[in-house]
Image: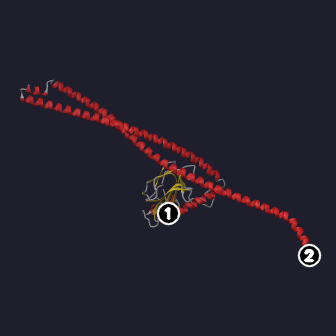
Amino acid sequence: MIRKILLITCLIACSLSPAIANNQSMLSRLKDKIASIKSLIHRDSNKRGQLQNELKHYEIHTGRISKKLNKTNKALSKQQNLLATLQKNEENAEEKLKHQRDLLSKQIQTAYVLGRQPYLKLILNQKDSDQLSRVMMYYQYIEHSRMTAISDLQNTLSQIDENKQEIQTEYETLQALQKKQLHEKNQLTTIKKNRQKLIKRINHKIQTRTQRLQRLVSDKHRLESTIDRLNQNAQGQHFGNFAHWRGKLLWPTRGKVLPIFGTQIEQSELRWGGVLIKAPDGRSVHAVANGKVVFSKWLSGYGLLVIINHGNGYMTLYGRNTTLYKKAGDTVRKGDLIATVGQSGGYQKPALYFAIRHNSKPLNPTTWCR
């Protein structure tokens, strides 16, 4: 009986062994495939990280070039105004020179009318003392006027020469600035083109909704961590009663305010902690109240970002800028220029991201600004 059971068991085991071996082979292939997919995901994630770093580099570089270009444009405008002033001065000096020459010509004619004799001979020929006195007075007056006219004429000629030298110098400076401006514009155009290509590559890598949400969650977490850290470091600082300005603050830039505070981000559980203000690229961004800049650099998802501490736990955030004009540690006053509107952070259209926080908690900017 026992021998019979052993025989049956042996027969069953022999019949099952190919199936078991086949399943184990399938399981092994599946594990290899999972490992391969994990490796691809890891490489893809690393690639996206590299692309994000490239984007950060391009957008920071764009901000620097834009700032330099803005400075060059201001210097160019100043030099053009100075050159126009110098050219106007030259016109005035030429007119003055013509007037002085006419005056000197008339004085010479007057002296000729009084007599062609030398001054000493004219005196010796006068017998009447009164007449002598008058002649001497006229002669001295004409002579003094003539010498003054000659002196003024020489001064005007000297001014014209100096003015022409200044015009030449300013013209050369103007040419150098125009050349510099053209170079900076070309640099900016190249950087912007490369940025657009890079954004397409990033978007190609982030294809699924899950990947987009993962990126949003990562960016939001990074911002929250930054704000919490800054809030802890800013404890005890005071720059006035920020709460007093509720409903009275001016918007940081002119544009169409999208009241998206509290709404869902891309149908996720994440919600907007601020608003977007649609405005042209390069439009000025101003501090809404007195405070101290505690953050001024690039942050993933928010681009070139400025955070101002207003004391008593209040902070304002200004993101997606093209150029930053303030650095961490700078004290700012209400209305100060702090940045310019842009699309940094990988966005396609220019807008300002604006948010208000109190002890890290988001507040609705539409209830604070008018």
**Element at label 2:** helix
Q: Is 173 above or below relative to 283?
A: above
Mark 2 crowd level (few <14, some 14–19, many ≥20, 10 Å Cα): few
Mark 1 element type: helix
Please identify, in this view, whether the residue under mark 1 or under mark 2 is nearer the observer. 2
Q: Is residue 31 left or right of residue 289?
A: right
Residue 222 spot, x, y in % from top left? 56, 61
What residue do we see at 68% from left, 56% from top? Answer: 40
Classify residue 109 as left or right of residue 298.
left
Assess disc 1: are there few (<14), some (14-19) or many (≥20) residues with their C-alpha within 10 Å of its C-alpha: some
Above/below status of 191 relative to 114 = below
Q: Quadrant of residue 157?
A: top left
Q: Amino acid at mark 2?
A: Ile
The percent coordinates of residue 151 (x first, y second) are 23, 34
* Mark closer to the chain start, 1 or 2: 2
| Quarter in which the N terminus is drawn | bottom right
Marker disc for residue 2: 2
Q: In the picture, residue 244 is in which quadrant?
A: bottom left
Amino acid of disc 1: Leu
Determine which residue is flagged by label 1.
230
Measure how far apart labels 1 and 2 are at the Cα level: 80 Å
